[in-house]
Image: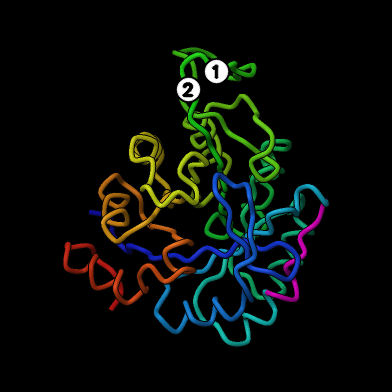
Amino acid sequence: MNKNTRLIARLDIKGPNLIKGVHLEGLRVIGSPNEHAIRYYLQGADELIYMDCVASLYGRNHLGDIVRAAARDIFVPMTVGGGIRSVDDATQVLRTGADKVAVNTAAVRDPDLVRRLADNFGSQCVVAAVDVRRQGEGEPRPPVRRSAGPPLDWNVYITGGREPTGLDAIEWIARLEALGAGEILLTSMDRDGTQQGYDLVLLRAASGRVGIPVIASGGAGNLEHLAQGLEAGAHGVLAASIFHFQGCSLPEARAFLRARGFPVRP
């Protein structure tokens, strides 16, 4: 089993609001991001991930005030993503109190950005966020950027899940590791918001391909799903819906995983 199993709460932000959607669409307002973040911190979350869901469309990250306020009260690692396109952008985000930066759209458009971020801040500070959708039989496929092998199984999407890239997800995460990313935040768009469980086939393929931590995201609906994600090779499990809507609490999740033999923090 993986060491340092992490329980991570995700906060998707649009403007001043915490939001949640299904398949990264149909976003609805949940409430105040910092009220939820403080609750998760007090309940024992190992990390928090803030994602500005529309930053790639607007060209900049708008989470500075939210993260700055959270950093005064929260003392676990915080990852911030959305709209980070340069080392200067990352510097500004880190100065607000973030511990790591997450890049997705900008990394696809400029892969060398990952290397520059790792050179400046260290790989431990660089999270490569990868949003993927499974290709169904008979679906039209975008031009696939891979050198050989069968048709891609998971297509990488950018701009908040709006734009298919034609990148094969498993090949792409291997390249991200080579460029210097410290971990992969892997979100199944097919499972996002459904509470039907993680895409375990995807997790096994990804964790078997890279040596850096893979964080499972998209689909957690109960405690068993968290355990299944870890059993599939994830180093950490991320959830939003079950914590936002209080389907279970972080202490319950921690106790459940500890009883299953996973090395979670007391």
Residue 221, position as x, y percentages in the image:
37, 56
Which residue type carries mark 1? Glu
Residue 35, position as x, y percentages in the image:
58, 81
Tell me, yes or no, whether the highlighted magenta stretch contains residue 60.
yes
For residue 139, which numbered disc appears in the image? 1
Locate the N terminus and report the quarter of the image it occupies: bottom left
Viewer-closest of 185 and 154: 154
Give the residue number, with chain letter if any, for mark 2.
Answer: 136
Secondary structure of the residue carrying tag 2 is: loop
Viewer-closest of 198 and 246: 246
Quadrant of res 203: top left
Magenta part, dominant SS: loop
Report the residue that reaches farthest toward the bottom: 73
Give the residue at x 59% y 17%. Answer: 141
Residue 264, position as x, y percentages in the image:
28, 69
On screen, residue 143 above or below 234: above
Tell me, yes or no, whether the highlighted magenta stretch contains residue 101.
no
Give the residue at x 37% y 73%. Answer: 250
Label pair 1/2, CB-CB below 8 angstroms: yes
In the image, is 80 to the left or to the right of 147?
right
Identify the coloring.
rainbow
| Distance from the alpha carbon under mark 1 to that under mark 2 | 6 Å
In the image, is 86 to the left or to the right of 220?
right
Q: Residues within 10 Å of mark 1 (few under 14, many from 20)?
A: few
For the record, the magenta segment spans: 59-66
